[in-house]
Image: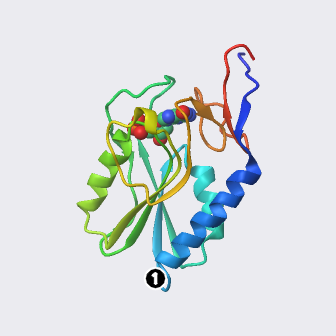
Amino acid sequence: MEQFNPDVLISEDEISLRLDELAKAINQDFAGEEVVLICVLKGAFMFCSDLMKKISLPVKLEFMQLSSYGDKMSSSGNVKVMLDVTGSIKGKNVIVIEDIVDTGLTLKTLLEILKKRDPKAVKLASLLYKPARNTHPVDIDYLGFEIEDKFVIGYGLDYAGRYRELPYIGVINAGN
Ligand code: 5GP
C-alpha cells in the first residue's frame, strides 16, 4: 500500500493555540446565548470536537455531509447534501464548522441552504482557507489558518480516505 511521510505544515500545538483564540471569539460573540454547531463531515470532525471543548456556552451538535471530492484532489463542482441535521435550526444561532474553504463552492451552497431555514444567525468557522483557488467568496467568521495552494491532509482531512488521524496538518510532497 502506498504510504507517504507528510511534512508538517501546522503543528498540533499551533492548532490548539489558534483554537483557543477562535473559541474565545465565539464565547464573546454569543455570550449568554445557545449555539448549534453543524459539523461538516467528514473532514471537520476533529476540528469540531476540539473547538467544542473550548466553548463555554450552552452548545448543541449537528452533523451534515455534502458530496466531496472522492479520491480526487480537485473539486467536481457538484454539491449534494448526503446527510442533513436532525433538528430544526429556526431561530437558532448556527455555526457551521468546516475543515477547509478551497473554491468556496461547498460552503456557499451550504450557507444558502441553511439561511432558507430561518435561523437567528449563521456563522462560519473554517480551520483552513486557500485563497488561491477561491472562486465562490464566502465570509469566514472564525478562521484558523490561511494556507498556500497545497493539498493538505491530517487533523481530519484525508487523501483517498486516509491520514485523517494525524494530529497535525501535513502536506504530501512527491518523493517522500
Ligand atoms: P470547495 O468546495 O471549497 O472547493 O472544497 C471544500 C472541500 O474540498 C473541503 O471540505 C474538503 O473536503 C475538500 N478539500 C479542499 N482542499 C483540500 C485539501 O487541500 N485537502 C483535503 N484533504 N481536502 C480538501
Please, what secondary structure does the residue beneath circle 1 have?
A: loop
Q: Going 46% across and 73% down the picture, which residue do you hit? A: 35
Q: Residue furthest top?
A: 175
From the viewer's side, name the closer residue of 149 and 44.
149
> What residue is rendered at 26% in x and 63% in y?
117
Residue visible at 47% across and 27% down in the picture: 70
Q: In the rendered image of this protein, does residue 94 appear above or below residue 58?
A: above
Q: Quadrant of the C terminus?
A: top right
Choose between 4 and 62: the one closer to the eye. Answer: 4
Q: Is residue 87 above or below residue 161?
A: below
Which image quarter holds the N terminus?
top right
Which colour scheme appears in the figure?
rainbow
Please state the horizontal and vertical placement of residue 56, each as a whole percent of the image.
Answer: 61, 77
Residue 72 position within the rendered picture, expressed as x and y whole percent measured from the top left = 49, 22
The residue furthest left is: 116
Determine which residue is flagged by label 1. Answer: 33
| 115 relative to 46, above or below | below
Q: Is residue 116 found left or right of 147 in the rendered image?
A: left
